[in-house]
Image: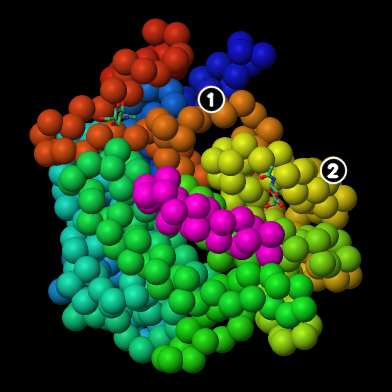
Amino acid sequence: MVVRKLAVMLLNCRWVANSLDFNKDYEASVFETTIRVVGGLLSTYDLSGDKIFLEKAKDIADRLLPAWNSPSGIPYNRINLARGGAHNFGWTGGNSILADSGTEQLEFIALSQRTKDPKYQEKVEKVVKELQKTFPADGLLPIYINPRSGTAAYSTITFGAMGDSFYEYLLKVWIQGNKTEAVKHYREMWETSMKGLQSLVRKTTPSSFTYICEKNGNFLSDKMDELACFAPGMLALGSKGYGSGEAEEVLSLAEELAWTCYNFYQLTPTKLAGENYYFHPGQDMNVGTSWNILRPETVESLFYLWRITGNKTYQEWGWNIFQAFEKNSRLETGYVGLKDVNSGIKDNMMQSFFLAETLKYLYLLFSPTSVISLDEWVFNTEAHPLRIVTRGDLHQENVQVDRQQKLPIHFRGRKEGRLGYN
Ligand SMILES: *[C@@H]1O[C@H](CO)[C@@H](O)[C@H](O)[C@H]1NC(C)=O
Ligand SMILES: *[C@@H]1O[C@H](CO)[C@@H](O)[C@H](O)[C@H]1NC(C)=O
């Protein structure tokens, strides 16, 4: 088994070294490329210690970096990997998207720590400093940010699509930096936002499911995306930083929300959740957009709740969701999403996050808690684990990857690695 794993790793190293080429005339999403590719490569570097993955992470991050050259430092959300030329999606009216602009911090900070080059970290930390200047009292930012002024444009406030992982990264940068003074403002901003989250919480009738509304202007809308089901996990993870009393309150909100998210699955004929839900007095909730594209957020939250509470109920819920994927989504060649969770009609796509996130969190839900310990690792929003490295002054930061990684010595730190396997 170990030999097999090492063989697979060796093949991957060779492919990454010889064939992985980012010089592509391709309009990349800065956010998706950061969380999937930069995050995936950095995580593989942290797990293997093989420098080739760090070199490749730097290669693609350098191609993304011009996206931050806007008047405010809020990044443009698209860039051509070969030619540069950063710009925003046409349909945002020229605005940058909150989640797309505020979900590169973990990866770029990790890259600076590991390369000892501060330029990546400086770009992404400036974004948070900029947003902090006009951060509202409830910590809730609309999904569109003007990249010229650095201020919010009138738009929806949500913990679902286009908002979500901005809030997640406020917490996780604080954890990644090992909760030191250098990252304290992230935790403060996060706590402010969690007060805001609580102001969006309502309960259904008759069954008293707790859910998170969206907000337009002063108006709360009784809708929740399955994407927002990452929030119970985030609240559970962050609950540890509060004093007693508040910690229990936040954890208990996390548990209530997880129950709702689990029921997004349980209430459909296939026992798989739709993309979003609407809440009506007297009727609890109804599926809105009814597809399921193998999303991870609910099992992600179950993983955190299991790790943090040790309550086996969360394993049971995760097992039931896994069984529903097995029953509805499994093909001989892989897994596909559903066009409709009511009828069970399949689509024809296996999203990469099914492997990176959904199956990984399910695997970890049934693994000993020492496997990727939350004391040593922080998961990026694509479930790629990055090592926690205590933040102080950048020059004093010392990455211990080479010392801690577990592969045999001949796999380590191969500066000449590209030649080694030919
Ligand atoms: C475990 O979690 C479930 C769901 O949140 C809850 O109903 C139950 O009371 C918990 N059990 C314990 C022992 O805390
Ligand atoms: C984080 O800081 C604590 C207290 O200083 C220390 O004991 C711990 O080892 C640090 N964690 C990591 C992963 O460096």
Write down the quadrant of residue 256 in the picture: bottom right
Residue that mark 1 sits on? 370
**Apparent side of residue 61 relative to residue 361 in the rendered image (left or right):** left
Which residue is drawn at the image coordinates 69% and 59% (left, top)?
259
Residue sitting farthest toward the bottom: 218
Residue sitting farthest toward the top: 409
Type of the residue with mark 2: Glu
Precedes in sequence: disc 1 or disc 2: 2
Q: Is residue 234 visible?
A: no
Tag 1 secondary structure: loop
Query: Please, what is the dominant secondary structure of the magenta stretch?
Result: helix
Q: Look at the image and give the residue range highlighted in magenta.
A: 238-260
* Callout 1 touching callout 2 (CB < 8 Å): no
In the rendered image, residue 66, in percent from the top left (x then y), is placed at: 23, 60
Residue that mark 2 sits on? 332
Residue 239 inside the magenta-drawn segment: yes
Examine the rendered structure and indicate whether residue 267 appears above or below residue 241: below
Which residue is drawn at the image coordinates 49% and 91% (left, top)?
219
